[in-house]
Amino acid sequence: MVGMSQRDKIQSYNALNAPVSQARFVDASREKLLAKLDISTIGDLLWHAPFRFLDLHSNHTIAQASFGEGAFVGTVHEVKIKRPKPRLNITEVAITDGTGVLLGVWFNQPWVQRSFMVGERVVFAGNVTFAYGLKQINQPFVEKLSQEKQHFEGLLPVHAVTEGISPGWMRRMIASAIDDYASQIDVLPLGIRKKYDFCSITQALRNVHFPRKLSEYRLARERLAYEELLLFELMCARKRYQTTVLSEGKSHKVPETFFESLKAVMPFEPTKDQVRAFQEISEDMQSPHPMNRMLLGDVGTGKTLVAFEALCLACANGYQGAMMAPTEVLAQQYAQKVGPLLDALNISWALLTGSTSAKKRTEILDQLQQGTIGVLFGTHALLEPDVIFNDLSLVIIDEQHRFGVNQRKTLREKGGMPDVLVMSATPIPRTLSATVYGDLATSYLFERPHSNAGFDTHLVKEHQAYKAYEALIKRLRAGEQGYVVCALVDESDEFEAKAANSHAERLKTHELSDFRVGLLTGKMRPAEKEEMMRQFKAHEIDVLVATTVIEVGVDVPNATAMVILDAERFGIAQLHQLRGRVGRGDIRGDVWLVSQALSNEAKERFKALLGTDDGFKLAEFDLKQRGPGDMLGVRQSGLLTFKIADLVEDSELVVAARHDAFEIIEHDFDLKMPQHNFLKEKVEELERARAQWVSAG
């Protein structure tokens, strides 16, 4: 690369975006097959890393073969097909090395017979088993040895392939692409490469595919993973810098008596976490630049109180605040909890939802536009075009992941460039929040305001469900309340699980016949749900049979017991959110998980739930078990498809890349410095992809 002109460098760099058909050995048919593996460019081919390696450094003879993984070199002795049943044919390829015979076995793949010739030398690798007195490997990994290369020693990469492209052809295509294109300009600036002692991009690509030893692979993989993460974090840092530092917002001042006034109306002493979180929020709100912050708190850690303080600061400066929740139940609850505190401070407020009457809605909209309403609580109804604020300076979005990108944008635009606080009761691992929400500053709540609050979790099999109901009844007789959670609303032919509608009727006449039983599901009309929640909060109902509609935000301090039926049907995050509905007052709650069958995965989930009530620890467990895609949902994980990086394995790299990205953007937002030229190219590619992703939904 020494002496290359800038034009040559750009051409070399841009070659990575060329169609994969320009790579050697990739004809039209292979191009179509590679597309099935999401390989459409030369860059995609270079970054198609192996998912495992076969270690052939110390080959054993066939005579030494025992149960388990192994790789063996031998000569093809015999190839034959057996047909023990009409619809079953078995291809057997016997190889020998002079010490014994090993069979490679393929089921219903007769074309395999044509792939072998008697006398050729091959490597068979895989899991060795014994059948009918013979050693065999079912569907072994096969590497053919040429006349020049009669022995294979080293690490044999195993890449993901598809029918029509053998592992050998995949290695051949990648090796040639490395020879032809891997000497492209390194995206990482020299300063960063020196800081972490990273190898060159050429060496990294060569060693991630064809290392001589695993230590070479690990170092190469780390370098490539860091590059992916840095590019993503740079995109996030640019967005955050643009929406905060480079934008003018509304600056809020903290009046002298502000904290005294708040303290006089607060229902309890704030925790240290709440104090710290509001300090971070108030510092952002005092800045002349817009706030863009996330408040993450486990169940029962008091996010509502922090939101109340932020709303008060907006109103204390003569501005308005809006708080949007994903459901009417939650919006009503915020209004009922925060409203009286606002009343005590003479701050006017209103609640606007889809079920607000036309007359009341008109009244609210008039007062909102005139500025006589300080705080507006609501649901998606706040997004309607005729909802016009007089001077909106603070937008709070609760459970923001339940709203689309464009919905959040619509609410923000009603205030020009307001401060934005998004909240979530779903604990998210730090590594995941640093990527998914990398453009947001983050405040955390861990402590619970009530020292006795919380819950104990128990697990019983379905035939022992009576134990759960006995515990629930004991609580009810003590004057407390409880929930019974069902996975379904109505009976289903597809799933075997308790349905809320029918089970509520059963409980009324059997287990809970002495108590008042109510029903709450997502299929009920808003007015019905509102009335049911009112009755439950007023203790006109003892037990609420519900679906996951109560998963987030429902706050009834007198509810101390919960029975979750068919618990294996819920994810770990859902179960944790559900059990967070009890133990919200001064009495510790009890949660009973009732499960029909325990798969190994379900056992692991339950073990984790029984072992801790720390939502952040459970989120880390969930991330390791399911990965970010399943945790966030396909739509939300669309920008988290890394080819090399792994958010679980590379948590330290995520932190390092985030720190470096924000430092780079602070000094060079436009990435105009010469050493950032190729970073800029890659980041802008990501930004274009993100824009398409956002516009798509």
Image: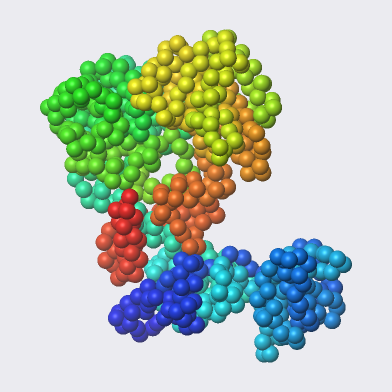
Image colouring: rainbow
The location of residue 627, given as percent across then percent down, is 52, 50
Direction front: furthest residue: 86
Residue 133 falls left or right of residue 299? right
The location of residue 351, given as percent across then percent down, is 27, 24
Direction right: furthest residue: 133
**Which residue is located at x 83 percent, y 64 percent?**
131
Q: Is residue 251 visible?
A: no
Residue in the foreground of this view, choosing between 205 and 492: 492
**Which residue is located at x 68 percent, y 74 percent?**
110
Residue 541 falls left or right of residue 171? left
Residue 529 falls left or right of residue 48? left
Quarter where residue 463 is shown: top right
Residue in the foreground of this view, choosing between 230 and 633: 633
**Which residue is located at x 45 percent, y 27 percent?**
521
Residue in the foreground of this view, choosing between 11 and 481: 481
The location of residue 174, given as percent across then percent down, is 52, 76
Quarter where residue 309 is shown: top left
Check the image and report above or below for 529 versus 50: above
Check the image and report above or below for 664 versus 10: above
**Which residue is located at x 22 percent, y 17 percent?**
346
Image quarter (top left, top right, bottom left or bottom right) of the N terminus: bottom left
Q: Is residue 460 visible?
A: yes
The location of residue 78, given as percent across then percent down, is 78, 81
Check the image and report above or below for 313 versus 293: above
